[in-house]
């Protein structure tokens, strides 16, 4: 008998490599949960099928000029109409890296998540400035916690 693992979708956008590094660390943490498959994709490559098949989503965005990355918004634009009634209650978490604040990107993504009727699973992670080793450890722990919650069905 084969047991289908629950899927955790991790999408991100990265131009300079920082957010990709953070997303990979999140995925490394999530990989500690054997009952959960993680799917790590740049937002430009993620699509409706990825979203509809996941049991939780993590979104990583840099903050540009006080807003989320355009490719994160593009993902939402491409999936919203077809997914909004099918993903109600989907647990989500955000991780944002910003040069000076990060709150603008978080606020924007939270508003969109409200439109999908998703629910925040954990406290979002906001990193200001270049990520430190402590930040990398925290994002790995966030990934592990998110995957554990998805795996156990508590989110």
Image (cartoon, rainbow, N blue to C red):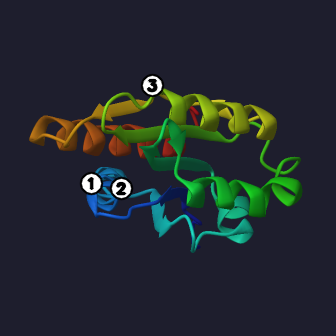
Q: Are marks 2 and 3 in contact (CB under 8 Å)?
A: no
* The C terminus lies in quadrant: top right
Q: CA distance from mark 3 to mark 1?
A: 17 Å
Element class at badge 2: helix
Q: In the image, is 137 to the left or to the right of 126?
A: left
Task: Give the residue at mark 1.
Answer: 25
Location of residue 54 in the rendering, given as x and y in whole percent from the top left corner: 63, 57
Location of residue 6 in the rendering, given as x and y in whole percent from the top left corner: 57, 57
**Residue drawn 50% across and 47% down?**
58
Query: Relative to 72, is 149 above or below?
Result: above
Most foreground residue, 108 or 39: 108
* The N terminus lies in quadrant: bottom right
The label shown at residue 51 is: none
Most foreground residue, 84 or 5: 84
Most foreground residue, 27 or 75: 75
Judged from this view, the residue extending furthest toward the front is 65
**Residue drawn 46% across and 48% down?**
61
Task: Give the residue at mark 2.
Answer: 23
Element class at badge 1: helix
Q: In the image, is 111 to the left or to the right of 39?
A: right
User: Which circle's residue, 3 or 1, is located before the other in the chain?
Assistant: 1
Counting other residues with Cα less than 10 Å from the Cα at mark 3, is it few (<14), some (14-19), or many (20 or more)?
A: few
**Residue drawn 36% across and 31% down?**
126
Q: Are marks 1 and 2 in contact (CB under 8 Å)?
A: yes
Counting other residues with Cα less than 10 Å from the Cα at mark 1, is it few (<14), some (14-19), or many (20 or more)?
A: many
Q: In the image, is 132 to the left or to the right of 65?
A: left
Query: Relative to 52, is 141 above or below?
Result: above
The label shown at residue 123 is: 3
């Amino acid at each position: 008998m084969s047991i289908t693992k629950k899927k955790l979708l991790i999408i991100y956008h990265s131009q300079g490599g920082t957010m990709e590094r953070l997303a990979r660390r999140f995925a490394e943490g999530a990989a500690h949960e054997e009952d959960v498959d993680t799917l790590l994709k740049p937002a430009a490559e993620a699509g409706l099928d990825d979203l509809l098949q996941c049991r939780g989503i993590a979104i990583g965005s840099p903050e540009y000029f006080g807003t989320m990355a355009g490719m994160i918004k593009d993902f939402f634009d491409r999936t919203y109409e077809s997914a909004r009634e099918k993903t109600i209650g989907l647990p989500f978490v955000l991780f944002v890296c910003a040069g000076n604040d990060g709150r603008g990107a978080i606020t924007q993504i939270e508003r969109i998540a409200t439109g999908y009727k998703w629910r925040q699973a954990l406290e979002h992670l906001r990193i200001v400035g270049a990520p430190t080793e402590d930040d990398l450890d925290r994002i790995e722990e966030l990934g592990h916690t998110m995957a554990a919650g998805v795996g156990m069905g508590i989110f």
